[in-house]
Image (cartoon, rainbow, N blue to C red):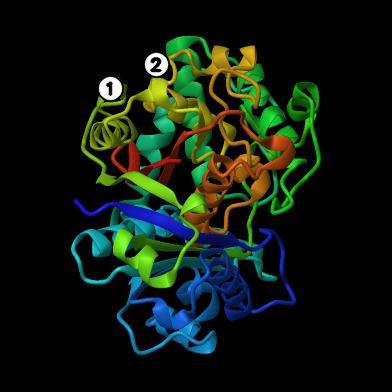
Amino acid sequence: MNEVYIAGIAMTVFGRHLERSLDDLAGEALTGALKDAGCDIGDIGAAFYAGMTNGPLQGQISIPGQVVFSKIGLEGIPIYNVENACASGSTAFNLAVQSLRAGSTDVALALGAEKMNIPDKVKAFSIFEGGWDVSRAEENYQTLVKMGEGVDVPPGTTSDKPFSKFMEIYAAMCRLHMKTYGTTQRQIAAVSAKNHTHSVHNPFSQFRKPFTIEEILAAPPITYPITLPMCAPLSDGSAAAIVCTREGLKRIGADRSRCIRVAASVLRSFSHRGIDQPELSVGHLAARQAYEQAGLGPQDMQVAEVHDASAMGEILQAENLGFVSFGDGGPAAERGEFTVGGRIPINPSGGLESKGHPLGATGIGQLYELVTQLRGEAGERQVKGARNAIQENGGGMQGVEEAAVAIHILSK
């Protein structure tokens, strides 16, 4: 296969950008990525646009990529619109990589952008309810929340304010892990406290306030064992990546010393496994596929960015990526193994809990952090000696797991 490199990458600050338009945010990310790559907009041969909220929240049901790109100077080339729930951005990146490997172009763009903050919060949260089979929504919900049965829920630990049904599902996953492996609420809180501490040093993060484990536990509840700081917020923002073949790098005159190789790009969908078969989870199988593609293993990774829409997500994905055995994610988090300076730093950006989660931009935002780490440009959150990095980004729910999972391995 043709070798593929990230030549340029950029992101906006993730957060509440009430005064900014979608195309304004996308334009900032594109301009930043072009500058980082040292190329012009005319060098791009194909573009992949990731966005999930354009239709339900802005009314742009069709051709969102063509509309947004036309406003920021990109037209006349193949433009593909990509929707894969929370994994949309990583899917767009995967498709950009495939277009290069197929030889359709030598320079491609993946860009994700979202405007999720609107006055009607109930409507904003409703977009998540399309992330499963809507014709069987109640059946899906009942199946998934049953995973949490068998764990006593303390009184007063469910919020009376609106929140996504997906947080109830995350809570059920937490309780399943608790009863299966003995994971504690404090261990889950340790993940959240670690990520909020990491975010203090990330200028692109939506939240930059540190929390202790005790503060996480004492925070307003969402639904047991999840409290508010353990959850990703509604976010606006954009991120863009320019990927090239070797020929493309030569054509645009890229600075090879700052280009990062895409060692693996994997996208995988769910299967109807049982809840007692974590070794068959889509995330674990996708990670194994990515390691094989890269010729590397979990022991070769120095840093990771994983999908932590709730703090429990990081524990599950640390296990799926092979950093710890199934069931040891919670204790490892409490031991500090996933902290910058620990055995395998996870989410030095602050993760989705702190950095933010503008769905279509999330995966490319994760890749931005890993490229920054591999370039040695992460400042106070820098992981020393980072040469190989792995990203995991999931989207939607089917069966008892994510409908789609993307895994990327990057190498210096």
Can you tell which quarter of the image residue 153 is in? top right
The residue to which callout 1 is attached is 279
Q: Quadrant of the C terminus?
A: top left
**Dot 1 surroundings within 10 Å: few (below 14), some, or many (20 or more)?**
few
Q: Is residue 196 visible?
A: no
Residue carrying label 2: 326
Q: Are marks 1 and 2 in contact (CB under 8 Å)?
A: yes
Frontmost residue, 70 versus 3: 3
Mark 1 or mark 2: whose residue is earlier in sequence = 1
Between 33 and 350, the one lying in front of the other is 33
Residue at the (40%, 27%) spot, across then down: 147
In-front residue for pair 239/2? 2
Q: Which residue is painted at 38% across and 58% down in the image? A: 93
Q: Amino acid at mark 1?
A: Glu
Q: Does residue 308 appear to the left or right of 265 in the view shown?
A: right
Name the spot of residue 287 as percent of width and height, x first: 32, 33
User: Does residue 249 appear to the left or right of 104 in the view shown?
Assistant: right
Q: Is residue 100 above or below residue 264?
A: below
Q: Secondary structure at mark 1?
A: helix
Secondary element type, mark 2: loop
On the rendered structure, is 307 left or right of 278? Answer: right
Whether residue 364 is visible, yes or no, is: yes
Q: Position of residue 31 (x, y in %)?
A: 58, 74
Q: Nearer the viewer, residue 166 or 193?
A: 193
Residue 25 percent across, percent down from the top left: 62, 73
Q: Which residue is pictured at 66% across the width and 58% down the height?
A: 14
Residue 337, x across and y down, in percent: 59, 17
